[in-house]
Amino acid sequence: MKLDKKLLAILLFAFILWVWNIGSVDLVSDDALYSFRALGWHDYLAAEGQTTPFQWFDSFPWWANLSFHDAPPLVFAIQKIFFVIFGDNPFGARLPFVLAMAATLYFVFLIGKELHSKKAGYLACFLMAIMSLAAYGAVAGLLEGVEVLFIVLAIHFWVKFIKTDDNKYLYLLFIFFSLALMSKYTAVFLPLAFLTDILFFRRGVFKRKELYLACLIFILILSPVIIYNIGMFQARDHFDAALASFLGQETNDFLSLRERGVSANIFHGLKSIFNNLAGMMSPPIFLLLIMAIFYNLHKTVKLSNSRERYFVFLAGFVWALIVLAMGGAGSRFLIILIPFIVLLIGILLAEANFKINQKILFILAAIIFFWELAYNINSNFLASPASESFLVYSQENIVGRELGFNQLDKYLRAEVLPGRGRITRPKNVAAVDAKAIEYIEEHGVVYFFDDSINWFAHNWYFRRYLNYYGLPLAPFSEQAKTLGVANPIKYFADAGVKDFYFIYGVADAVIDPKKIDSPARQASKLLAQMLDGQGVKHQEIKNHLGQAAFRVYQFDIK
């Protein structure tokens, strides 16, 4: 097989662009929750309104190991493998998503080449390489960043099946259908799109035994999630959080998720999707997408012999839009639309080559692509954006996630939390507390942190050390409530603890917006002021801009 230098250059450019700063981007959103749980295959969130089997049972049931309470298990499993190889750090947390997005780019090229032309494939994958939405998908660490790879693999074998009518591709198609669903349930649009295709173009497929064998393989691969949900329904009278929301099952186990669910107002959802797309793509690329949708729709209706090749992209895109519109239409979901967006645009530009003067087309394409690249760099890769105008800045970006948490973690691991031991998965809530108490008794130290610090981040940067390493990191105000005392420091000092640490959030950016004026925030401020007044020394932790983000106080009580 001849080396495709153009494709290789695009792949290398995209990979280098996406990978170079993944170790510096903080885990401050759902990525922190996924990474925390994947690390020890431990389904727990420190949230009263979203409890898990870990909190429900004293003895963890066997079926609860097969999946997670709010999402299927495949992405967690992939992340865990990377943690085993690279350790529990941001690089290990994010690398699988970068590699998945790079692989997605490669298969986007193959799909464009096989279903249309090599030029369409090059254009699509080059656009993806420079696209801000793709960079966000590669680095944000969300489930969709891996889900999109299995989606594009399914589409690849769907295209192979269309071109060859070979049943082996039918099996591969359904394998990747199921792996996409094992990543996230939003991939349910894929079987719907395929069903639409065969109803319009290939009804004879329904007579093939291979289709039903492929369906059996599909169910077998999904069996861990099926068994998990049967076990959960028997124990708690509801399915996992995602299915419970979809089916309208109300439960106190997922109290904070009650407002989620399926909306019948598809048009409102579609409006939200396109508003979010407009906010995450440069204006010329967004306009090009709208033109590409209508162009491909026109070609699907107009052509008789080759309309299926245009229909594949449109069917997948339309069904994805419908599913997302019904399910909430959040910005993060747009990641799974990337293959359709770039392929639709790639086809438009490839065919425009035959209808517009090549020199004019080249100049227009260069301006549009350069604009998107500048939009991407400004949104995701500058230390501070040059402008936050919608013309050059995405509403969802990576720069906004470099707040100083990684600098704090580096300091804690080097100076405060040495000799952590091995990661151990706790058996139950009582085991977590018991291990922390054992550490306190042996070392005579307690680590408090500001309760008001970003809730998502605290799971990765603090809760990880408590649950997996048995280190006594405790939220200051919450610990006071748990113990039923006004001053938890005095409580532990009376119990013989001599050494204390307090991690205080200085910058508002590291504080949970909902807790900025909370009693917990006020208590942390008062403690920091008291320690400063007593002349207690602290280590100031700065973010990537050199601004103070945290203070780490160390003091003893004799």
Image: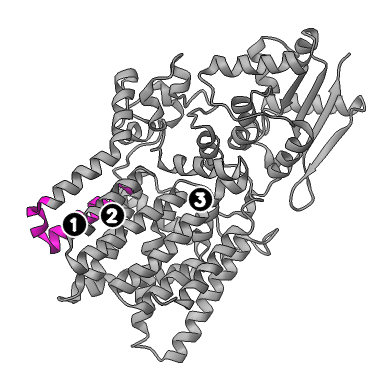
Majority SS type along the magenta span: helix
Q: Residues within 10 Å of mark 3 (few under 14, many from 20)?
A: many
Q: Residues within 10 Å of mark 2 (few under 14, many from 20)?
A: many
Q: CA distance from mark 2 to mark 1?
A: 9 Å
* In-front residue for pair 39/332: 39
Range of the magenta residues? Answer: 187-209
Which residue is painted at 70% across and 58% down in the image? 383
Q: Earlier in the sequence, mark 3 or mark 1?
A: 3
- The residue pinned by badge 3 equals 96
Relative image position of residue 148 (x, y in whole percent): 40, 54
- The label nearer to you, 3 versus 2, is 3
Which residue is painted at 46% across and 49% down in the image? 332
- The residue pinned by badge 1 equals 196
Q: CA distance from mark 3 to mark 1?
A: 32 Å
Judge left or right: residue 104 versus residue 499: left
Judge left or right: residue 339 versus residue 489: left
Relative image position of residue 417 (x, y in whole percent): 74, 31
